[in-house]
Amino acid sequence: MTYHTTVSATLEPGSPAQLGAHFDGGGTNFAVFSEHAAQVFLCLFSPDGKTEEMRLPLPERTGSVWHGYLPGLAPGTLYGYRVSGPYDPDSGHRFNRNKLLIDPYTREFHGAFSDHTATFGYQHAAPESDLSFDSRDSAPFVAKSVVSDPALFPLDAQPLGNGWHETLIYEAHVKGLTKCHPDIPKTARGTYDGLATPAMLDHLTKLGVTAVELLPVQSIKSEGALSGRGLVNYWGYNTIGFFAPEPRYFGPAGVRGFRAMVDRFHAAGIEVILDVVYNHSAEGDHLGPTLSFRGLDNAAYYRLQDDNPRYYVNDTGCGNTLNVTHPFVTRMILDSLRFWVQGMGVDGFRFDLATTICREADGFDRNGRFLTALRQDPVLAGVKLIAEPWDIGPGGYQLGGFPATFSEWNDRYRDTVRKFWRGDAHGAQELGSALLGTAYVFDKRGRRVWSSINYAASHDGFTLADTTRYEKRHNQANGEGNRDGHKANFSDNFGVEGPSPDPDIQAQRAKRQRNMLATVFLSQGTPMLLAGDEGGHSQNGNNNSYCQDTEISWINWSTLDPDQITFTAALSRFRRNTPVLRQMDFLHGATRETDRRKDVEWRGFDGKPLNWGDETLSSLCLHLRGNAESVAGKACSDEVLLAFNRSDDDLDLLVPNTPSNKWVREIETSNAGQDATPVDGERIRVPAHSVSAFVLRDGPRE
């Protein structure tokens, strides 16, 4: 839409009600929060962003909101703020009106951020460091905020609403997933436009994916240290604009491409979940640039050390921590979440370092201000909420500590699966808990089985294939002396570090991957698959590829194993067809009232009770009957027998006696091909180092 208006040179009072810049058809209202500022100036720029054409003081302050209305100002106008006030780092204030600041609520950016030293509020080379004051204009080196056309972001989207018990999450990076896909048009590769093309939708549908979880797509600024090494923040956990889609992923459709992508996913029955980073900003520590929050009101937006407010609380390990206990920071986060749901169609959020945003003065509080406000919000009540339940601050590890409306990344599950298949002592005991949703952690306060997000690999760490190829990290390309990334990967290279031409080693590695994939899909809880793991994607041993916007991270579709992809699809289909694997309630061996049989039973391959006290236990069977009404209130009559054989020998399994129907083996991991095999007789052979899944069907399957 084209607007033809004449801009007034005088700001009218406007309204403080809606933060950000909002065009109403006749002009634009500007409103921005700053509690400690002396004055806020609106700066208007030429269409190319190079010339500041007008600087106007916002005429009104209502509480802590500065506001004004400019008649005739149309969408597409470039702007920023300058804020005057005390520059006193020792007191926590870092106002510097020479620094152009982006609007925290902007939905679009023009231009890019530079690492030029003029973006710092202090003289970068001064002996006094950040206690000095820099008077240079930073505007040439800062992206400009854009007054958005409201037609670009109609607030009319509705979440898809897939049930948690149906969910299979596929964690992916927009560029990494599509950059090298041969069936995606070249102009769309690496973009939002390419993410929901027919080629990708066909692949995801084949896998049975019901939700894609995208690494951060809110606007990103790479750290200066990475730029100095010729690298970028590839993962994107360094947000500078919480309302604006990251421009580096724009394709031919520009900003419209994001909503169009979501709409195409929804048409295919696939939800979109965003990984969001509300725990810190891209402004870094006290030596970082002044781009937005620091210059608007450092003491309000950030948590500062009580005894020395020159420095930031760093519970995130990223230099600063947003002050989520401040009502206007809470408001910004909630406004941002609502925008992505209503304006962009997003179905849920995975909160990076979620412990941080749930901290009160005394630490993590599940009933604190942010979580209370989030649970009370009617727009956000129906979306999926996922916590990464830790940070590096005191008491930061909070697995199982979140409210019942949340699911959580279960890193204990990941480590348990890896350690069991690697052959660690006590691995079977830990696996027994993991297979039933890690109930000792999550079964409290009315939580459901889906609270546990079960995964064997994620973006952070080795890929699934690399857990079978490398025992040590190989992060030299990151330029940090191979000191970054996890040390403990619970991996196993089968005697050779890295690729091996030996067909026996290759076969063992492939089977190990199938075993871990099968474990994830056969466990109670919510399964998550890292993009590329379905076909054996490798990052050559790099377990911290956060700065690798290179072939290290991009999925090379030509090298993926089609047999493993087919196997993964078969696992997904089996889970989808077998409701007893998708319980809503935890199973504890309770006697069902309907038939007086237990909802779950453990046994050895010989049919006898397991000796859980045996630390060398390497083989176990799980007989699942489930609750009478265990999946979204629907009757669940199928039974499943899961047999895990980690020993070096093939084992004969004594199958439970049934009065009528025969057991059928539908999953067997010793090879990638899957054919349903009826069990004739009382025993069946389970190959060494494999998983078998048997089922008694009472109803149709796909």
Image: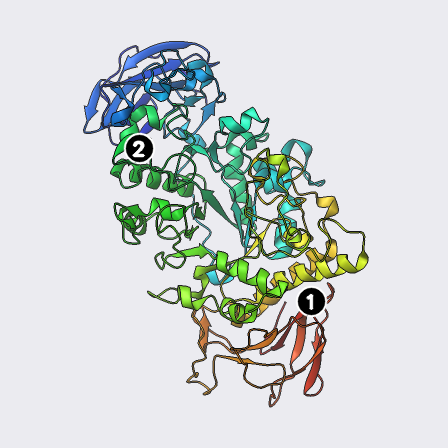
As drawn, 67 above or below 376: above
Q: Is residue 65 left or right of residue 627?
A: left
As drawn, 167 above or below 350: below
Say which of 95 and 31 sits in front: 95
Q: Is residue 669 left or right of residue 392?
A: right
Crowdedness near tag 2: few (<14), some (14–19) or many (≥20) residues, C-alpha within 10 Å: many
Residue 633, percent from left and from top: 43, 71
Q: Which amino acid type is marked by label 1?
A: Thr
Observer able to see residue 15: no
Place residue 338 in its image quadrant: top left
Q: Disc 2 and disc 1: Cα gap in Å?
A: 52 Å
Q: Residue at x 62, y 48 (%)?
A: 201
Residue tagged 2: 301
Query: Split into 4 quadrants, where in the image is the C terminus?
Result: bottom right
For the view shown, which residue lies furthest in the front direction? 127
Q: Residue at x 36, y 60 (%)?
A: 404
Observer able to see residue 480: yes
**Residue 682 has which mark?**
none
Residue tagged 1: 669
As drawn, 611 above or below 77: below
Q: Is residue 397 left or right of residue 89?
A: right
Residue 229, percent from left and from top: 58, 27
Tag 2 secondary structure: helix
Residue 396, percent from left and from top: 38, 50
